[in-house]
Image: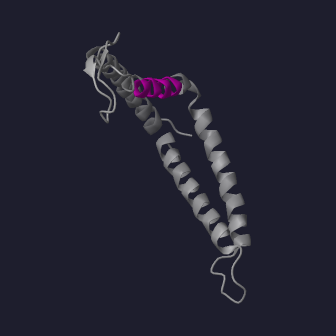
């Protein structure tokens, strides 16, 4: 199994766990005399089996990713950085508030919108490159 396949299986297991928990939450306590469509005890037993499988799979994925942790962490931080840079207010000149409640103010920005966008574009290019490397790793590395 490749990491890519393992990640899909992990998501399948997580969905199956959510489905089993929904059964427990919904059908544990029902009106007396009503039919219980699912056994909460059976669902709990199934949850324990699914959890063991998920723990085992996550462990294998993490062990297989040791050699690319630096790329995984870098990718995560670059995505966060790009998101935060995009939130910088780069307004310049006469600016009114959104609702026109106050007199317009005159603003100046140390980082212009163009400079910000250039920085974000460079970060996004690195993100794309890292993502390609990780996609290749995930598609070829077996666990």
Q: Quadrant of residue 81?
A: top left
- For the point 41% across and 28% down, the residue is 83
Give x and y (percent) for residue 100.
29, 33
Q: Where in the figure is residue 135, as x and y percent of width and height?
A: 41, 34
Please name whichever residue, 20 or 141, is drawn nearer the observer in this view of the structure.
20
The colour mode here is one colour
Instruction: Determine whether 89 is above or below 61 in the image.
Output: above
Seen in the picture, residue 55 relative to 74 is either above or below; the reply is below
Q: What x and y, as percent, mark residue 2? A: 49, 42
Residue that appears at 33% across and 16% down: 119
Q: Nearer the viewer, residue 69 or 87?
A: 87
Q: Residue 104 sits in which quadrant?
A: top left
- Residue at horizontal 70 percent and vertical 90 percent from the top: 33
Is 18 colored magenta in this rendering?
no
Residue 66 position (above or below residue 51): above
Specify whether 11 is left or right of 125: right
Q: Is residue 28 above or below residue 111?
A: below
In the image, farthest residue toward the top: 110
- The total of numbered circles placed on residues is 0
Specify the segment rendered in magenta.
72-84
Q: Main secondary structure of the magenta part?
A: helix
Rendered-image quadrant of the C terminus: top right
- At which x and y percent is residue 105? 31, 19
């Amino acid at each position: 199994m490749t990491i890519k396949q393992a990640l899909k299986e992990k998501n399948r297991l997580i969905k199956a766990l959510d489905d089993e928990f929904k059964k427990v939450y919904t059908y544990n306590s029902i009106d007396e005399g009503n039919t219980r469509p699912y056994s909460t005890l059976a669902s709990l037993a199934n949850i324990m089996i699914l959890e063991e499988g998920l723990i085992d799979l996550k462990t294998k994925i993490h062990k297989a990713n040791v050699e690319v942790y630096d790329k995984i962490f870098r990718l995560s931080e670059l995505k966060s950085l790009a998101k935060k840079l995009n939130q910088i207010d780069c307004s310049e000149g006469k600016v009114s508030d959104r609702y026109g409640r106050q007199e317009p103010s005159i603003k100046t920005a140390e980082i212009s919108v163009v400079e910000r966008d250039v920085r974000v574009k460079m970060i996004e290019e690195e993100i794309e490159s890292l993502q390609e490397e990780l996609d290749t790793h995930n598609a070829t590395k077996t666990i």
